[in-house]
Amino acid sequence: MQSFTLHSGVVVAMDRANVDTDQIIPKQFLKRIERTGFGQFLFNDWRFREDGTPDPQFELNLPEAKGATILLARRNFGCGSSREHAPWSLADYGFRCVIAPTFADIFYSNCFSNGILPIRLSEDDVDQLFELADVAKRSGSGQYELNVDLNESTLSDGQGFQRTFEVEPFRKRCLLE
């Protein structure tokens, strides 16, 4: 597992609450026992149409999501069944961090075990991040970036947004090392 200290990355804004693990990685892809190779199936039922072509309206298929490593979502992310395949697929796709107001407990724990930093922020802070991502989407660059400093437990965009977040000391040390 790759350590996590500092990370700067493009944000993809998934304006959805109660995203369950069945949507993160649908059950038909759970036949493998390896921890790799699941990224291609991430959000499969939302990312692809029935004919297998990408849905151009889905968040991860938008141009501003290209290369995203930080996922911004609404409350109760990772609810549903307790499959560890969900963080495996997020990590394999390239996500290092997920930001939401709340997470399902088992999903939250599984993120740490798989090198993903789940950051809990208030609903107001998450609303503000969605607004900032939308402004960037409509601007010339199209992409919104955030900087995560796990040592200092800070999240910032270099343009005025800065927040601290809490991580239990043991989990923090595990990610740092």
Image (cartoon, helix red, strand yellow):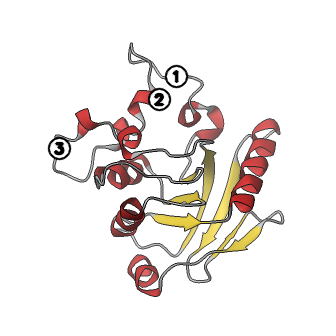
- The answer to whether mark 1 and mark 2 are in CB contact below 8 A is yes
Please tell me which residue is depicted at 63% across the width and 33% down the height of the picture: 63
Mark 1 packing: few (<14 Cα in 10 Å), some, or many (20+)? some
- The answer to whether mark 3 and mark 2 are in CB contact below 8 A is no
Q: Amino acid at mark 2?
A: Arg
Report the residue marked by disc 2: 47
Q: Position of residue 3 (x, y in %)?
A: 41, 73
Please tell me which residue is depicted at 68% across the width and 55% down the height of the picture: 145
Q: Earlier in the sequence, mark 3 or mark 2?
A: 3
Q: Earlier in the sequence, mark 1 or mark 2?
A: 2
Q: Secondary structure at mark 1?
A: loop
Above or below 43: residue 88: below
Q: Earlier in the sequence, mark 3 or mark 1?
A: 3
Residue 151: which numbered mark, if any? none
**Horizontally, is 79 left or right of 132 in the view?**
left
Q: Position of residue 51 (x, y in %)?
A: 39, 13
Residue 32: which numbered mark, if any? 3
**Horizontally, is 44 left or right of 97 in the view?**
left
> CA separation, marks 1 and 2?
6 Å
> CA separation, marks 3 and 2?
21 Å
**Horizontally, is 33 left or right of 137 in the view?**
left
Mark 2 packing: few (<14 Cα in 10 Å), some, or many (20+)? some
Please tell me which residue is depicted at 28% across the width and 44% down the height of the picture: 37
Q: Residue furthest top?
A: 51
In this view of the protein, which residue sits in the foreground, 40 or 169?
169
Q: Which image quadrant: the N terminus?
A: bottom left
Where residue 26 sits, quadrant-wise, is top left
In this view of the protein, which residue sits in the foreground, 12 or 6?
12
Report the residue marked by disc 1: 55
Q: Secondary structure at mark 3?
A: loop
